[in-house]
Amino acid sequence: MWERVRRKQVNGIKFYRQYIIEHADILGVKAFFIADFYCHPQKLIIEIDGDIHLTCEQKKYDKERSEVLREMGYRIIRFTNQEVLENWEEVQERLLLMLG
């Protein structure tokens, strides 16, 4: 994915990878999420999901994390590893739709 979105290759838009998003400060301890990829002007988070995301526990965590991030004004789009590796054209099309 990084090789496909880096250096403004998608619509001239800059993406960051492994981007830290702080979401809480609890008694002086900062809590944060790490987005796989992030586009700042669009507040768009791209998550790439491997097999670990198929477990019940991880699905629950992903859902709660996404709710927090959406409440903070972020938009999230998810792709599987398989989609990125085997069907880049569809991934790119969905990504371009999100970027408007």
Image (cartoon, rainbow, N blue to C red):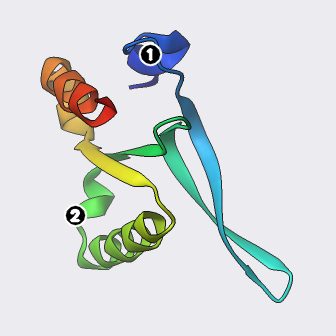
Q: Secondary structure at mark 1?
A: helix
Q: Position of residue 50 (x, y in %)?
A: 30, 49
Q: CA distance from mark 1 to mark 2?
A: 25 Å
Question: Camera-side residue: 47 or 52?
Answer: 47
Query: Residue, x 38% and y 66% (percent of image)?
Result: 66
Q: Residue 59: x percent and y percent?
A: 28, 71
- The location of residue 94, given as percent across then percent down, is 19, 32
**Vertical relation: 76 (above or below) 99:** below
Q: Residue at x 26, y 25 (%)?
A: 96
Q: Is residue 29 left or right of residue 71?
A: right
Q: Would you place residue 98 above or below residue 86 in this image? A: below
The residue carrying pointer 2 sits among few (fewer than 14), some (14 to 19) or many (20 or more) residues within 10 Å by Cα, namely few
Mark yes or no: residue 89 visible: yes
Q: Judge depth for marks 1 and 2 and give the one in front.
A: 1
Which of the two discs, 1 and 2, labels the residue nearer the N terminus?
Answer: 1
Q: Position of residue 61 (x, y in %)?
A: 38, 75
Looking at the rendered structure, which numbered label has been put on residue 54? 2
Task: Tell me the residue that label 1 is attached to.
Answer: 3
The image quadrant that residue 12 belongs to is top left
The answer to whether residue 49 is seen in the rendering is no
